[in-house]
Image: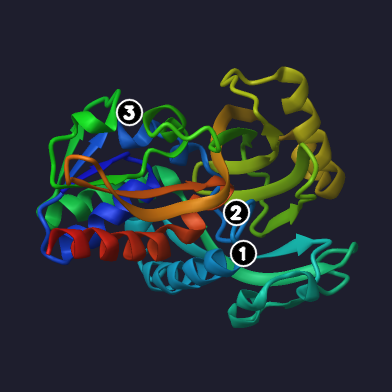
């Protein structure tokens, strides 16, 4: 089997297949450290992903895995960290929320504006993506730096398409669209909790995540914007919004600017397609801003579709 795409969706899917005894090759246009997944702030939470019912189930499967991986944070890059989703109410969320351990209303001393407090997986992608690659290699899989211009050129009985935004051209699937996200990484002035204040209909939001490489500040959600060049004005506004909540952020030294394009779709595409030549293509893409959140749930479902086709 060939898995096309070396981001978190592709690598996790390949790991599941390889650990079930399948011979798996990952073809990735970019080294895993330079995929869109590498840019992610990577807090576990179903964000900008549909359909909600399926996404909630995939997310809960992934949550259980991340809770186990958090026992080895230095190795896996996964930690359990407390924080607040500002302005979020439990009744606004789907049934999945009732199964998130410890999710409760935030106290006034935790966030004055009200919201939900939780202790959730926060994933350091700089560590997690290489760890996934090594786990795949230990299971007998391989990773090849190889660009694909047409999925038909993959000469495998079963191909798993985890190409994210590139699926727009490769499938082709015009329903996949970019949602541009810009982040600023600053030296952490001592903040140990995360916070989000997100309006899912707005192009800007406010959040910060303490990661080993610095405090990640966000963010933007600009639909159909393809530019990967950081916007200085947007960066300044991001810092200002975060500093309005935690004033110590205002004086923090900027380490890095990041831009990523979330592969958003009206609904995740996770299904099997039989090509005219009889070969099978399993699609697993369109997770938008929640790729890390649903990675393991989607991977297991995609692996099941691929195995059924191979048997």
Q: CA distance from mark 3 to mark 2?
A: 24 Å
- Callout 3 secondary element: loop
Residue 6 lies, with reference to residue 166, above or below; the image says: below
Crowding at mark 2 (Cα within 10 Å: few <14, some 14-19, many 20+): many
Which mark is on residue 33?
none
Crowding at mark 1 (Cα within 10 Å: few <14, some 14-19, many 20+): some
Instruction: State the residue in front, 39 or 164.
Output: 164
Q: Residue at x 51, y 59 (%)?
A: 293
| x, y percent for residue 160 | 28, 47
Instruction: Judge depth for marks 3 and 2 and give the one in front.
Output: 2
Answer whether residue 123 is visible to the viewer in this image: no
| x, y percent for residue 106 | 80, 73
Rendering quarter of residue 183: top right
Identify the residue under disc 3. 30
Q: Residue at x 65, y 78 (%)?
A: 95
Q: Are marks 1 and 2 in contact (CB under 8 Å)?
A: yes
Q: Earlier in the sequence, mark 3 or mark 1?
A: 3
Rendering quarter of residue 203: top right
What colouring does the structure picture have? rainbow
On the picture, is 247 further left or further right than 141? right
Which mark is on residue 52?
1
| x, y percent for residue 274 | 26, 49
- Callout 1 secondary element: helix
On the picture, is 271 further left or further right than 237? left
Quadrant location, the C terminus: bottom left
Q: CA distance from mark 1 to mark 2?
A: 7 Å
Q: CA distance from mark 3 to mark 1?
A: 30 Å
Crowding at mark 3 (Cα within 10 Å: few <14, some 14-19, many 20+): some
Identify the residue under disc 2. 49
């Amino acid at each position: 089997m060939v898995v096309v795409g070396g981001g978190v969706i592709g690598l996790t899917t390949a790991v599941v297949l390889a650990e079930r005894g399948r011979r798996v090759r990952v073809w990735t246009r970019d080294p895993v450290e330079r995929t869109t997944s590498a840019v992610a702030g990577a807090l576990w939470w179903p964000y900008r992903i549909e359909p909600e019912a399926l996404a909630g189930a995939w997310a809960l499967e992934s949550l259980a895995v991340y809770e186990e991986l958090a026992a080895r944070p230095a190795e896996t890059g996964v930690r359990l960290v407390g924080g607040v989703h500002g302005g979020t109410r439990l009744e606004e969320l789907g049934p999945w929320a009732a199964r998130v351990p410890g999710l409760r209303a935030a106290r006034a001393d935790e966030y004055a504006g009200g919201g939900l407090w939780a202790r959730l997986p926060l994933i350091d992608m700089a560590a997690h993506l290489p760890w996934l690659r090594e786990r795949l290699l230990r299971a007998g899989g391989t990773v090849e730096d190889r660009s694909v211009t047409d999925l038909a050129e993959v000469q495998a009985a079963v191909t798993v398409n985890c190409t994210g935004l590139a699926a727009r051209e490769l499938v082709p699937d015009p329903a996949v669209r970019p949602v541009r996200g810009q982040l600023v990484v600053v030296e952490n002035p001592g903040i140990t909790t995360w916070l989000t204040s997100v309006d899912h209909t707005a192009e800007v939001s406010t959040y910060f995540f303490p990661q080993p490489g610095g405090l990640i500040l966000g963010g933007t959600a600009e639909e159909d914007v393809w530019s990967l060049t950081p916007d200085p004005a947007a960066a300044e506004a991001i810092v200002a919004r975060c500093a309005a909540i935690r004033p110590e952020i205002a004086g923090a030294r900027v380490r890095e600017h990041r831009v990523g394009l979330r592969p958003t779709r009206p609904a995740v595409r996770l299904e099997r397609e039989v090509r005219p030549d009889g070969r099978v293509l399993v699609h697993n893409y369109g997770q938008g801003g929640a790729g890390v959140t649903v990675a393991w749930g989607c991977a297991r479902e995609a692996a099941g579709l691929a195995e059924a086709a191979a048997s």
